[in-house]
Amino acid sequence: MEWIDTAIVLQIRPHGETSAVAEFFTRGQGRHLGLVRGGRSRRLRPLLQAGNLLKAHWRARLADQLGFFVVELAEPFAALALDDRLALAGIGTLTALARLLPERDAHPELFELAVLLLHHLGEPQLWPQLLARWEMQLLAELGFGLDLDACAATGSADDLIYVSPKSARAVSAAAGEPYKHLLLPLPAFLKHPTAADASPAQIHDALTLTGFFLEQHVLAPRGLTFPEGRRHLLDALRKREEEVDCPKCRPGQPSG
C-alpha cells in the first residue's frame, strides 16, 4: 500500500532515539499518521514543524498499519512565521483544530482553505478572517454546521445579524431585537465568501461565534480546550478594534 499527497504538518512525537511519529493533514487522505525514520535528525527536524507544507510519500504493507513517511518540503510556513507571534498563534490554532478530524477521512475543501490561510499569513488583516471561515467549515464537516440561510423565527433571508446559541440558526435584526443580549453576532463576511474587508471587530465576533459552537459540540465533550494562541489572537483583535474606535489610542498619535 502506498500513496503520495500534499500534507500540512500537525504534530510530531518522538519515537525511539532518532525517529518520529508524524501526524499530517493531507488533501486526499485526510488526517494521517506515519513513522518518519530519522525524523529527529538535524536534516529533517526543520521540515517537520507544525504548519509546514510537505510532499508526503506513505508506504505500508497493509492499509491499517501505521506505515512510513518519506517527506520533502514544499512550503516552509513555520519558518516564515517565526518572528510573528500572531501568525504562530494562527498556525497553532489551525493545526490543533485539524487534529479533531477523524483519522483517514478526506476533507479536501477544508484542506484547500487551510493552505490558502497559510499562504496569507503575511497579511494580518486577511488571514484571521480566513481562520474564522475555516473554523465554520470545520464545524460543518464535523456535523455541526451553522444554518445561516434564513431567520429561525420568520423564515426571512433578509437582515440576518444574529445566530441563536441554541439552534445554531440565523436570526434577523427585527426578530432578534428583544433577545439580542442572548444571541451571538453574525458578521456579514461569514455569509459572503468573497468578502475581504472585515473589520477587527467583525473578525473577533466571527471567531467568538465559531469558538462557541466548537467548544460546545467538539472540544468540551472530549475534555479539550482551545490552544492558548487563539486567546492571544482574540485579545489582539480586541485591541485593534479599540484603536479603530479611539484614534488617539493608536501608537504614535498625540494624547491631547
Image (cartoon, rainbow, N blue to C red):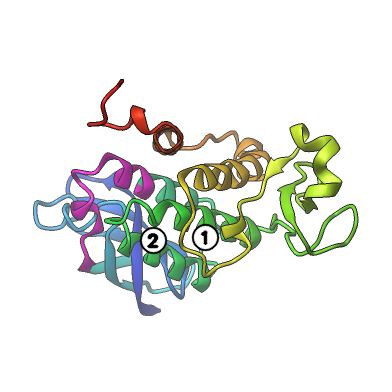
Residue 177 location (% of width, % of height): 81, 40
Badge 2 marks a residue whose secondary structure is helix
Q: In which quarter of the image is residue 2?
A: bottom left
> Upstream in the sequence, badge 1 or badge 2?
1
Question: What is the three-letter code of the residue carrying label 2?
Answer: Leu
**Residue 117, label in figure:** 2
Residue 170 in which image quadrant: bottom right
Residue at the image position 19 percent from the left and 54 percent from the top: 80
Residue 221 percent location from the top left of the image: 66, 38
Q: Which of 60 and 84 is in front in this view?
A: 84
- Quote the CA–CA distance across marks 1 and 2: 22 Å
What stretch of residues is rendered in magenta? 73-91
Label number found at residue 103: 1
Q: How crowded is mark 1: few (under 14 residues within 10 Å), some or many (20 or more)?
A: some
Is residue 80 highlighted in magenta?
yes
Question: Picture coordinates of residue 143 (x, y %)?
Answer: 69, 58
Q: Left or right of 14: which side holds 167?
A: right
